[in-house]
Amino acid sequence: MSRINGFVGRRHFLNLAGVGSISIVSSVAGCSILKDTKSAIAREATLADATTNKPKPVSPDEALKLLLDGNQRFVQQKRKYPDQTLERIRVISQAQYPFAAILGCADSRVPAEIVFDRGLGDLFVVRIAGNVASESAIGSLEYATNVLGSQVIVVLGHKRCGAVATALQDQPVSGRMGLIVENIKPAIEKIKSTTENLQGDAVIANIKYQAQRLQENSTTLAKLIHQNKLKIVSALYDLDSGTVSIISK
């Protein structure tokens, strides 16, 4: 290597720098490839875990029992908080297998995962005021059952439902809320002349009516029921005790 006044010559310096740059670039590229490889392996491992941890299919009756057992734990203040860990988040990040679907009211006092003591990935929950079986709700539940494999749909209403109370007033409702009320009124008309407890019975009638709509307005759900792969259950949540009671199944 030639030196000029004790310094490396310009040509030799550039050659040396070029070699060094190549080495550095190669090193960086190697690290990047290694990092990408590790990331790919990690993703595959997570996916494998999700597949490996796919729960065994349960029957509609078994799925319902899991829900009711969880509600008993909730009422008795013996909650287990299942499937709520960081590990659970990692396992279900690539796939979900909810064993049950809930069509519930959007009321803030009736969060399904809490009242049934379930966790991440256990329930496919559709919430709308008055637990109305709207077209969007039906489509969502078709996805939960026909694609994700949920074995039971619980139509979960609750006592003193505000949407039902509004429908009972039989007065014009402004905005989009009117659409919800109109979907509840047919249930009320069926019992209006046959009950002395219109407030309470209207809630129950609406729950049953919405469950019936799911079957009548969805050939997908009706087919799964016919194949004994699905059960649609009507249930009532007690705001005072936290208890879920089955109305019909």
Image (cartoon, rainbow, N blue to C red):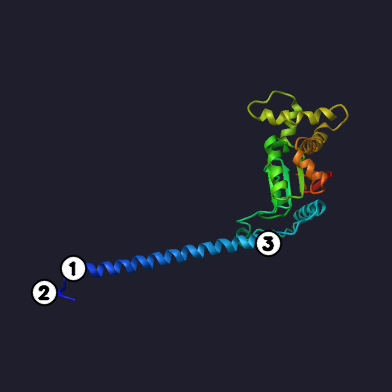
Which residue sits furthest right?
194
Label 1: few (<14), some (14–19) or many (≥20) C-alpha neighbours in 10 Å: few
Q: Is residue 186 something that shows in the picture?
A: yes
- The image quadrant that residue 83 belongs to is bottom right
Pick the front one: 133 or 174: 133
Mark 3 or mark 1: name the one nearer the start of the chain. 1
As drawn, 99 above or below 126: below
Q: Residue at x 77, y 52 (%)?
A: 67
Q: Can you identify the residue that label 3 sits on?
A: 53
Q: Which mark is residue 11?
A: 1
Amino acid marked by disc 2: Asn
Left or right: 90 as drawn, with respect to 184: left
Q: Residue at x 66, y 60 (%)?
A: 51
Q: Secondary structure at mark 1?
A: helix
Mark 2 or mark 1: name the one nearer the start of the chain. 2
The percent coordinates of residue 46 (x first, y second) are: 59, 61
Mark 3 vs mark 1, CA separation in Å: 62 Å
Q: Are marks 3 and 2 in contact (CB under 8 Å)?
A: no
Label 2: few (<14), some (14–19) or many (≥20) C-alpha neighbours in 10 Å: few
